Amino acid sequence: MNGSLPVLRSFFLFISKARWARQIIMSWGVSRRVARRFVVGETLDEAVQAIRDLNAAGLNATFDHLGESVTNEAEAVRATDAYLAILARILETGIRSNASLKLSQLGLNLSYDLCLNNVRRVVQKAAEGGLFIRIDMEDTPTVDRTIELWRTLRKEGLVNVGLVFQACLYRTERDVSAVLAEGCRIRLCKGAYKEPASLAYPKKSDVDASYDRLVRMMIDAARAGGAECASADGRRPPITGVATHDDKRVAAARAYAEQVGFPKQALEFQMLYGIRPELQRQLAAAGYPVRVYVAYGTEWYPFFMRRLAERPANVWFFVSNFFRR
C-alpha cells in the first residue's frame, strides 16, 4: 500500500487541474456530499455558523472563499468583493477569525498589477478593522510574485499580512530565512501541489525532515524577536504557524518549543476543517492557539482533490461513500 501512495497523490493532483475530470466528478452527487467533510458549505452564512461552532469549542479560524486561477478581470473583482464581505461579517459578528486568500483567485495570472490592486483593497480594509490577511502559496510559478507582492504591501505600511510556505520545495529554507528577517508571520505546510523532483523533495521522509528543520528556524527567529503571542481576540496569529495534521510533526514542534522555553501562546497549530478535529481540541486544551481553515463556496473541486491527495484516509472516505450511494 505504501508504494502506491505517491501514485495516488500524483493522480489526484493531476486531475485537480483537469477540466474533463472536473466535469465528471462534479456531476456525481456523492462527490459534493463527501466534499462537505472539508467544505462547510457554499454560502458565507454557512461559514460564519461553522466558525461560531469552532469558537465555542475554543478554536480560532481563517476564512477561505474557494476559487483560484480566474480567467478574466470581472471574476477577480468579484472574488475581491467576496473577501470584503467576509471582513465586514467578521467585524459585524465578532467571531474569532481572519482570512486567507489565493492570488490566482484575485487575478495574478492575468496581471500582477490587477492582483496587487485587488489584494491591496482587501488588506487595507482588514487593517482598518484590526484584522489579519494570510496569502496562501500556490505552485512554484507563483512563488516569486507572491513574495514580491507581500513585500510591496509591507513597504506601503500594510503589515497585517503574512505568507504561507511549503516545506516540500528546495527553495523554501532560503525564502523563509529571508522573510523572517523582515518580520513575516508564516504558516508552514508540507505542500499540496504537484511539483517536479527538480524543484521539490520527492520522498516523504525528506519533506518531513525539511518541515521539522523549518519549524525550528521559525521558532528561533520568533524567540530572537521576543516571541510575540497570538492576540487575545484570536484574529492576529503569532509569527510561527505550524500547519499540519501529522502527529509526528506536531510532536516535534512541541518538543523543540519546550526544549528552548518557547511560550505556548507563541506557537499556533493550524489545521483544515474536517480533518483531525480531535487533535485540534487536544492541542487547544493543552494551551496552544489552534486555527482551523474554513473553506466555503461553489468552487470546491480543486480544493477537494488536493485533500484526497494529502491523506490515504481521505481517499478511503471518498471511495467508501461512493459505493454506498
Image (spheres, helix red, strand yellow):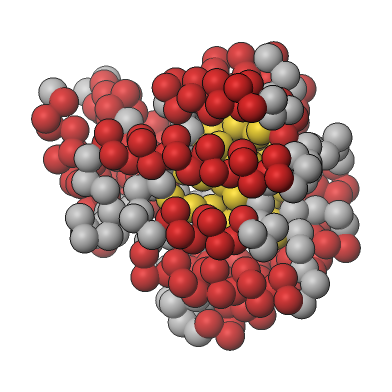
Residue 142 to residue 209: above or below:
below
Left or right placement of residue 246 versus residue 162 in this view: left
Question: In the rendered view of the protein, which quadrant contains the C terminus?
Answer: top left
Residue 324 visible in image: yes
Residue 229 to residue 121: above or below:
above
* Residue 171 x, y percent position in the rendering: 38, 59
Q: Nearer the viewer, residue 277 or 257?
A: 257
Residue 18 to residue 8: above or below:
below
* Residue 75 x, y percent position in the rendering: 54, 73
* Residue 71 x, y percent position in the rendering: 43, 76
Who's the residue at 32% across and 31% down the image? Answer: 311
**In which quarter of the view is residue 52 placed?**
top right
Left or right placement of residue 47 versus residue 310 in this view: right
Question: In the rendered view of the protein, which quadrant contains the N terminus?
Answer: top left
Who's the residue at 48% across and 33% down the image? Answer: 244
Residue 273 to residue 129: above or below:
above
* Residue 163 x, y percent position in the rendering: 58, 57
Who's the residue at 65% across and 34% down the image? Answer: 268
Q: Nearer the viewer, residue 94 or 281?
A: 281
Residue 76 visible in image: no
Q: Nearer the viewer, residue 116 or 162?
A: 162
Number of residue marks: 0
Who's the residue at 59% across and 74% down the image? Answer: 149
